[in-house]
Image: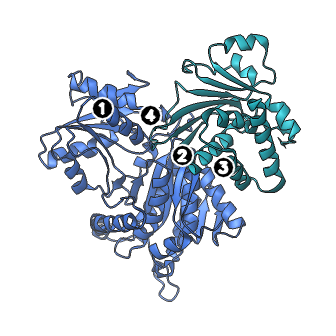
Amino acid sequence: MTFSMEIRWHGRGGHGIVSASNLLCEMAMRKGYYGISIPIFGAERRGAPTKVYTRISSRPIYKRSEIKNPDMVVITDATLLHIVDPLNGLKKGGYVVINSHRLGEDDMSLLSQYNVIPINAVDIALKADLRVGGIPVVTIPLLGGILKVIGIIDLDTAVSVIREKWEGELGEKNVKALEMAMEVIKA
Amino acid sequence: MSITSRVKKVLTGNHATAYAVMQARVDVIPAYPITPQTTIVEKLDEFIENGLLDASMIRVESEHSAMAAAIGASAAGARTYTATSSHGLLYMYENLWWAANARLPIVATFVTRAIGPPWNIWSDHQDIFTLRDTGWILFMAKNAQEAYDLTIQAFKIAENPNIRLPVGVGYDGFYTSHTSEPVEMLSQDEVDSFLPDKRAIKPLLDPEHPYTIGNLPDASFNFLIRKNMWSSMESSLDYIRKVGYEYYLLTGRNYGDLVDKYRTDDAETIFVSIGAMANEGIVAVDKLRARGVKVGHMALRLLRPFPTAEVLDVLDGADRVIVFSRALSMGKGGVLFTELADLAYRYHLDIDVYDVVVGLSGVEVVDNDFIKIFRDVSEGVFDNKETIFLLGGKYV
């Protein structure tokens, strides 16, 4: 059976969407899939809108151009909904994995035609004490949501990749945030 | 991490290159940072700091000095590496010629990036093509795996005593340099036995036998220096093939064929491109083949010396070649086009060669660009006398 998924990440400089996308590819590779993570660089600075594309497939991946019609978009900050049009081109019935911190009622109506996976990533990151430079790391809880949707990567594989990337206490905080997110979605 | 056994990791093109350079156990790295090259040298610095690489990192004040230091180190017999892009490459330029004429086996990475003004950090191939006539052996990788593989091979080719030419490995800024994808790396033992003993590099400078180099000789002497380089370039093709097949036996990845062929065997139309856009060309071929159209794609992985025999072999049986250039010779046409058109003339090929310029200044090239050009050329919208410019799916 062939599997293929195109994911577009919308974040802000400093959120770590490039690292998270790379991590997702590493996890997919461990399960025998191909993955490619394509960051879009301009004049980067903290807080400015940023974009990354992830392709995962059971077949070798050649394309490294822009993803215009993603199967999933990941949004690290709900305020981006009104700034960069992150839903543009998202396939009908596509998935929106979104940080629900600051996600308003009106925003939900924007998302009504999609499969929405809201995750309070700020809350989870703070509970897991997962912060870099004082800022909660929202991408790891969101990664929990992504893993849940795509279904090809088990928790054990994800955890071992995270522990290789960050040793010791920081690794455990990342693991905790990921597990908490996956629990929340299960409920 | 020292690589004790073969390992597959998700890496950017730049980090894959840095691992290859580390495993090649280089002695000296003079470098100056420039986007999108920077993360190669940063990673190498990290390897040196962590004790994984025993090399001298020379922090110079400019790219001109980076290549000057590389020339000095290589002339003293050290295995020498540097990397640059765009304006950095241009600032280095006269010394790049010096390195070639002095027959120094330096290996360098050229992460392609457009040349300003206006300021631009994205990829096109204008920078690397300024090296076309220097005497550097030039590769162009289409992904991170090729960047890694070709960097390992580059040291072996450069240091062959019958070749003794600098080797450059190019790939696209961001599309390859910063994109992360699975890369299989060889074990350190495998690299050690694949590469020659670096102590065998015959130093150009020898304190026991002092002599001057770069003096003012008779003009015909200079002529012969260039003619001898030409002969070494020509004969290097056989050795580059040999190294490529040796690498193929080791890894299962074929570099001996010199060109990267995709479904070209029975193709009537051949797309030709280089670097990252070749991936889109391959996707376009699959889409057109699904409609029963006989097309193929050839990536020119080796730019200099030009692999004439291999290219002729691919073109045999085809009646049309569509050449995609990401660099433009003002007042002439696509830079890659002339390379193919010249063959058609010299070898009396009954083949139409089309000249398409795409992706300048980092404008994205996608599979649909190849498909659109194929359709319009097939319908006779263009003839092969004109240079076609395609930007974002529209002719300009």
How crowded pointer 3 is (Cα within 10 Å; few <14, some 14-19, many 20+) is rated as some
How crowded pointer 2 is (Cα within 10 Å; few <14, some 14-19, many 20+) is rated as some
Residue at point 83%, 37% (across, down): A125
Which amino acid type is marked by label 3? Thr
**Disc 3 or disc 4, which is closer to the eye?**
3
Of residues B29 and A94, the one nearer the viewer is: A94
Which amino acid type is marked by label 1? Ala
Residue at point 36%, 35% (across, down): B330
Give the Cα separation between the discs numbered 3 and 4: 41 Å
- Chain identity for the colour blue used in the image: B
Tag 4–tag 1 contact (CB < 8 Å): no
Residue identifier under label 2: B87
The reply to whether label 4 and label 1 mark residues of one chain is yes
Q: Residue B89 location, x and y as percent?
A: 51, 51
Whether residue B243 is visible to the viewer of this picture, yes or no, is: yes
How crowded pointer 1 is (Cα within 10 Å; few <14, some 14-19, many 20+) is rated as few
Residue identifier under label 3: A157
Which amino acid type is marked by label 4? Leu
Chain holding disc 2: B
